[in-house]
């Protein structure tokens, strides 16, 4: 292979082109990019077709990279080269992984893709393109659009990074119930691009076509730069009445949509359980306070509420629920403003306190008879105080709640155990949601609350004739929220001509019963001769929904036999309908060698903790994101570890794989991996910031490959923290307090709080100062890794080996022709250092398999 170029294409979420060859920019040219999406009764079938050509007289490697919605299942992929088609095949994950691992061990495989972001996940495949050759990539995926806050949304993140001769996004929508409203929006639309957008709509159908010409794509006539850079969004809803909903039938399968409107809202009894442990310090706790202040304002006068905060101890705003009067809300807001981060994490006691508070309120008959009680937990870490075993906590909470209340678990960032939160929420009638540590975290929190703020029905039972329906999906629901939708699907017996349905539910004011009858033959006529229909779409919708529900049930299943049967059935359907789910993988054969292939797996939300390539907790003010596997390509050796599966990463790291320090540059999405040249057993001045009143020194180990001791001094408070491989010692005056790595604990002296998470990490924090975290790394030998949170809080007086990086430091983005794409110049107060992109072990992660892509720098000790 003579060259390498990245090319990427759009999916329901994103279109990006990454070109890694500046000398031959756009050597791989996308001359045609079509995204065709058919949305029939909320079920979307999307096909992306990208045609490329290698314009050079030498071979180039092109990478087809796609971001698609997390809720979507890939169903097909193929690439055509010189008239030969190379299809992707879907296999059971275990057998596909074994095949892949065997290939890796012989150096044959091209790579493993496991990546996820907030709304998207990635698919990519690479292929060597001969000189002047053309290649066609085609990817298909399907998803059931979920109604949230009264609308369905299709989001396209359009970023081609080059002009495309034949570019179009073509969306057809068919909703037999009728389209209530339809809107398009864009962050990059101009007058020129508006002319490229057409929207045609009638009672039940809509057609949106975005087809800009080359001239319309150009920023200006003189520049070969595209103005297509941003979000293209389609939002719509359907017409509905207060009845038993709408039933649609195709080829013996039915789907039933139920979303009554104009229903009275139940009063809520809600307890917010908020983590205020040391790891929440900085931007996390600020955003949580901001979100709670807004949420409290949205409480209705008939609601009851309370607040519980927890760290090493549990604190209650009030020892009972209070009505959401103006006076009580203002009092709660004043309390929220005082919440500060410190201490450990006692999740068990906090949730038991919340359940007990609701029990007392019910016993005292404070709450309305017809009301909904819920607990909303927000945490960013693992239990480190009190009961630490997650299974015991889950059992305790399930016993305390006992089906009386609903528990929602929000995991802030990536230090949480999402599986733990998800199982606990599902066992108690709720859901888990990850809150991504980003600039809009408070909006994410508010958005979740808005989804559950308006319960209008509870105890919903949807009944169909037992002898007429086969393989019914979930038909019993604890709650229905205004703006959402209940979806049930199943197979109809061939003998049935009329399908009756009865829905029983409780509203705030009465017991409700809805009845409906669907004439099977008449319903099937609705979808005959419609050009929008793709095969047996309702059967595929049924399979899609069944797989999702089986996987969800398997998480909370108590009996191992039941769990295994649910997983087995989900796998069977995944293979039958060719869905890439969490149980299957797509094997994509490489055309240049039939034994070479790539393996595409669907990541789950829990995989974020294992496979992410950067950590949010490294800097609470930096953007949290999941780095693309292809983001940093240097030599093949540079990123080979990024592409290998977990089973091949689990080995002892080689010398030098761990950097001495991982530095997040303030207000920049750039990470520096710093190694220093120093004498063994020597002490080095790392940080000295007189305005913040702190200094940090470090001691190198015997071979100078790692640090084994850190001393942190708070000058104004006359407190020193000495952290070694044995534990921590806090010194103040003549007082000493010792903490060991062997157990979780915390201690506070003069406002300086130390929190130890057993054999994992130690956090040092003080109000209005920089929070420091020290990882205890056991592989390849015991050493300590130091990193800082809130790095933009350092003053411009900071000095020392690390301190110099925290102001007036930046990467030069155009350092000169002599530097390659994997090299930059790091400007530190005018001193320029050449850095190169490398993959390093990330000591900030719990897992020993995590890597980070960073700018590597060697410096002499100061």
Image (cartoon, rainbow, N blue to C red):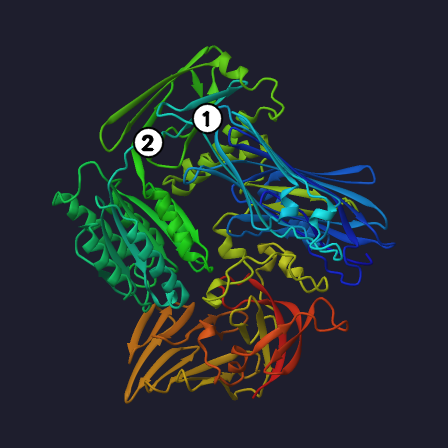
**Coordinates of residue 520 in the picture (x, y in percent):** 48, 14
The image's mark for residue 305 is: none
x, y percentage for residue 390? 35, 54
Residue denoted by label 1: 489
Quarter of the image for residue 406 reads top left
Left or right of residue 517, residue 512 in this image: left
- Quarter of the image where the C terminus is located: bottom right
Query: Can you name the residue that lies furthest to the front here?
Result: 191
Residue at 54%, 62% (x, y): give it: 614
The label on residue 262 is 2
The N terminus lies in quadrant: bottom right
Q: Image quadrant of residue 620?
A: bottom left
Whole-Å distance between the Cαs marked 2 and 1? Answer: 25 Å
Q: Is residue 457 above or below residue 393?
A: above
Q: Is 691 located above or below residue 484 in the figure?
A: below
User: Residue lying furthest left in this view?
Assistant: 364
Q: Is residue 392 visible?
A: no
Q: Residue at x 24, y 62 (%)?
A: 335
> Earlier along the polypeptide chain: callout 2 or callout 1?
2
Q: Is residue 402 left or right of residue 722?
A: left
Q: Residue 786 versus residue 230: which sits nearer the camera?
A: 230
Question: Residue at coordinates 29% horizontally, 65% vertically from top-left?
Answer: 339
Residue 309: where, in percent of width, then height? Answer: 27, 60
Asked whether 184 or 74 is in front, the reply is: 184
Q: Is residue 36 left or right of residue 201?
A: right
Which quadrant would residue 79 be assigned to in this image? top right
Where's residue 15, x and y in %? 64, 48
Secondary structure at badge 1 equals strand
- Does residue 495 appear in this view? yes
Q: Nearer the viewer, residue 251 or 848?
A: 251
Left or right of residue 847: residue 821: right
């Amino acid at each position: 292979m003579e060259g390498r170029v990245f090319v990427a294409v759009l999916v329901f979420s994103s279109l990006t082109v990454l070109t890694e060859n500046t000398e031959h920019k756009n050597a791989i040219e996308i001359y045609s990019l079509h995204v065709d999406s058919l949305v029939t009764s909320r079920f979307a079938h999307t096909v992306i077709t990208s045609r490329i050509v290698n314009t050079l007289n030498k071979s180039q490697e092109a990478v087809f990279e796609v971001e698609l919605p997390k809720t979507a299942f890939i169903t097909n992929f193929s690439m055509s080269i010189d008239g030969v088609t190379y299809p992707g095949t879907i296999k059971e994950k275990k057998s596909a992984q074994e095949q892949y691992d065997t290939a890796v061990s012989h150096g044959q495989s091209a790579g493993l893709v496991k990546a996820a972001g907030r709304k998207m996940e990635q698919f990519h495949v690479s292929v060597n393109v001969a000189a002047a050759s053309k290649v066609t990539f085609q990817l298909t995926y399907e998803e059931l659009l979920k109604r949230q806050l009264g609308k369905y949304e299709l989001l396209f993140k359009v970023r081609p990074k080059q002009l495309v001769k034949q570019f179009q996004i073509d969306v057809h929508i068919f909703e037999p119930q009728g389209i209530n409203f339809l809107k398009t929006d864009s962050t990059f639309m101009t007058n020129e691009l508006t002319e490229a957008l057409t929207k045609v709509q009638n009672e039940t159908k809509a057609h949106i076509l975005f087809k800009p010409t080359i001239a319309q794509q150009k920023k200006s006539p003189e520049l070969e730069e595209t103005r297509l850079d941003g979000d293209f969004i389609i939002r719509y809803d359907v017409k509905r009445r207060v009845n038993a909903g709408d039933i649609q039938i195709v080829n013996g399968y039915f789907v039933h949509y139920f979303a009554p409107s104009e229903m009275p809202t139940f009063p809520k009894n809600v307890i917010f359980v908020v983590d205020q442990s040391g790891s929440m310090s900085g931007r996390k706790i600020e955003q949580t306070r901001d979100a709670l202040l807004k949420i409290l304002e949205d409480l209705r006068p008939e609601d009851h509420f309370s607040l519980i905060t927890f760290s090493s101890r549990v604190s209650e705003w009030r020892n009972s629920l209070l009505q959401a009067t103006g006076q009580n809300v203002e009092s709660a807001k004043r309390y929220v403003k005082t919440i500060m981060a410190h201490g450990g994490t006692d999740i068990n006691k906090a949730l038991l306190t919340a359940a007990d508070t609701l029990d007392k309120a019910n016993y005292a008959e404070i709450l309305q008879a017809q009301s909904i009680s819920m607990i909303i937990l927000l945490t960013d870490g693992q239990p480190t105080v009190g009961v630490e075993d997650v299974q015991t906590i889950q059992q305790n909470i399930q016993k305390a709640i006992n089906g009386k209340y609903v528990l929602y678990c929000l995991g802030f960032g990536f230090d949480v155990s999402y599986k733990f939160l998800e199982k606990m929420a599902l066992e108690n009638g709720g859901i888990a949601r990850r809150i991504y540590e980003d600039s809009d975290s408070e909006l994410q929190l508010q958005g979740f609350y808005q989804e559950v703020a308006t319960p209008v029905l509870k105890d919903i039972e949807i009944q169909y004739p037992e002898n007429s329906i086969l393989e019914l999906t979930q038909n019993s629901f604890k709650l229905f929220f205004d703006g959402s939708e209940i979806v049930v699907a199943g197979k109809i017996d061939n003998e049935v001509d009329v399908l009756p349905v009865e829905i029983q539910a409780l509203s705030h004011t009465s017991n409700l019963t809805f009845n409906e009858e669907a004439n099977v033959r008449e319903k099937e006529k609705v979808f005959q001769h419609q050009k929008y229909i793709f095969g047996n779409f309702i059967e595929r919708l049924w399979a899609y929904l069944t797989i999702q529900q089986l996987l969800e049930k398997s998480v909370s299943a108590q009996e191992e036999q039941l769990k295994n049967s649910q997983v087995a059935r989900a796998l069977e359907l995944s293979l039958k309908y060719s869905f890439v789910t969490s149980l299957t993988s797509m094997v994509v054969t490489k055309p240049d060698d039939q034994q070479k292939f790539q393996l595409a797996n669907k990541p789950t939300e829990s995989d974020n903790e294992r496979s992410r390539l950067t950590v949010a907790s490294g800097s609470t003010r930096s953007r949290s994101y999941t780095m693309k596997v292809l983001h940093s390509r240097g030599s093949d050796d540079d990123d080979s570890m990024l592409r290998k599966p977990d089973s091949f990463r689990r080995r002892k790291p080689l010398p030098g794989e761990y950097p001495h320090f991982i530095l997040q540059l303030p207000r920049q999405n750039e990470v520096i991996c710093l190694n220093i040249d120093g004498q063994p057993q020597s002490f080095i001045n790392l940080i000295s910031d007189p305005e913040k009143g702190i200094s940090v020194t470090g001691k190198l180990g015997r071979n100078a490959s790692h640090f084994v001791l850190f001393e942190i001094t708070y000058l104004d408070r006359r407190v020193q923290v000495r952290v070694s491989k044995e534990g921590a010692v806090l010194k103040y005056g003549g007082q000493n307090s010792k903490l060991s790595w062997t157990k979780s604990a915390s201690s506070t002296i003069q406002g300086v709080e130390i929190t130890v998470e057993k054999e994992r990490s130690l956090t040092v924090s003080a109000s209005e100062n920089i929070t420091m975290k020290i990882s205890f790394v056991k592989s390849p030998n015991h050493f300590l890794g130091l990193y800082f949170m809130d790095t933009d809080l350092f003053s411009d007086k900071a000095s020392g080996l690390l301190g110099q990086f925290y102001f007036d430091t930046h990467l030069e983005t155009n350092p000169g022709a002599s530097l390659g794409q994997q090299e930059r110049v790091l400007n530190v107060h005018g001193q320029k250092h050449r850095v190169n992109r490398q993959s390093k072990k990330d000591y900030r992660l719990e897992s020993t398999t995590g890597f980070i892509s960073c700018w590597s720098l060697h410096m002499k000790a100061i």
